């Protein structure tokens, strides 16, 4: 039996062309989370991160706060923890609407000028991807994505000794896929869950005998206690 404390990355730079980096607020969220873990003294033995910049930046910032006076452990980077390819999904969506490849890229730049509008279009594109209505050579399907994520979590869970506590840094789509596996819910529920996972939130899973069990989901008490509504973000 091992425990996985799964962290969604801090706020990234949504609405910018360079999304895959933490915003200033995202860095603050990560520092607060790291201070929280330091005070809790949970005794993590394993540290894992997806390969995206926002995931690794969150890991480095949190762990830097956890170990302010000693050697900071290095998180093991696992490709299985990376998020789905949002850029390719939204590009494929515009192509499905009749745009050429170049026109799709221009459409993305144009819609990014209005982040709220872009988000609604993006959410619709992801829904189509969930339903298997968007595909392209080299674009991972939702089924392939989910299977890959579950393999990654099984790899972490099976590697630890009894009662090992692991800290895992990843993204909302990954956490929703793990939730789906643990709860046995359908794609529609998993889709809805994905948009409710807050930045720098904590979800805890138990891994035992090859199965995942949800213990807690989307906790942000470490942010709420700061009494600053700006810290509670979804994107």
Image (tube, grey):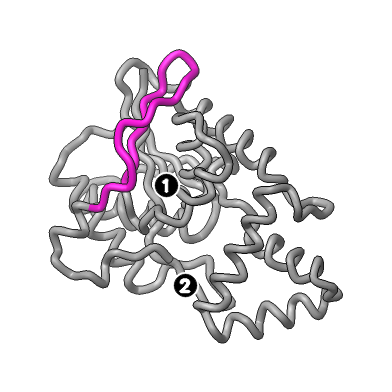
Q: Residue 80's quadrant in the figure?
A: top right
Evaluate if marks 2 and 1 touch, with contact meaning CB atoms under 8 Å apart.
Answer: no
Marks counted in the figure total: 2
Q: Which mark is residue 169?
A: 1
Is 110 on the left-hand or right-hand side of 221?
A: right
Task: Please name the residue shown 49% across and 51% down the image.
Answer: 192
Secondary structure that dominates the magenta span: strand
Q: Which residues are magenta?
A: 202-220
Q: Nearer the viewer, residue 65 or 1?
A: 1
Q: Which residue is mark 2?
A: 13
Does residue 77 lie above or below 122 as drawn? above
Q: Nearer the viewer, residue 52 or 134?
A: 134
Task: Please name the residue shown 33% across and 57% down the image.
Answer: 61
Res 164 seen here: yes
**Magenta stretch encompasses residue 18:** no
Q: Position of residue 234 (x, y in %)?
A: 39, 63
């Amino acid at each position: 039996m091992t425990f996985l404390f799964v962290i969604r990355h801090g706020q990234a730079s949504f609405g910018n062309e360079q999304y895959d980096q933490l915003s200033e607020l995202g860095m603050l969220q990560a520092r607060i989370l790291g201070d929280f873990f330091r005070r809790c003294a949970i005794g993590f033995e394993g540290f894992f991160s997806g390969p995206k910049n926002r995931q690794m930046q969150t890991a480095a910032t949190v762990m830097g706060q956890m170990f302010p006076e000693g050697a900071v452990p290095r998180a093991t980077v696992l490709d299985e923890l990376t998020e789905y390819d949002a850029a390719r999904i939204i590009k494929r969506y515009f192509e499905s609407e009749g745009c050429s490849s170049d026109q799709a890229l221009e459409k993305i730049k144009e819609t990014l000028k209005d982040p709220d509008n872009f988000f609604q279009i993006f959410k619709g594109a992801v829904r189509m991807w969930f339903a298997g209505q968007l595909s392209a050579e080299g674009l991972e399907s939702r089924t392939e994505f989910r299977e890959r994520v579950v393999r990654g979590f099984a790899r972490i869970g099976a590697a630890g000794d009894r009662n090992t506590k692991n800290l895992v840094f990843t993204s909302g789509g990954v956490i929703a896929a793990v939730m789906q596996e643990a709860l046995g819910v359908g794609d529609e529920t998993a889709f809805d869950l994905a948009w409710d996972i807050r930045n720098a939130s904590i979800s805890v899973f138990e891994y035992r005998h090859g199965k995942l069990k949800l213990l807690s989901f989307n906790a942000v008490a470490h942010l709420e206690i700061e009494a600053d509504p700006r810290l509670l973000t979804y994107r």
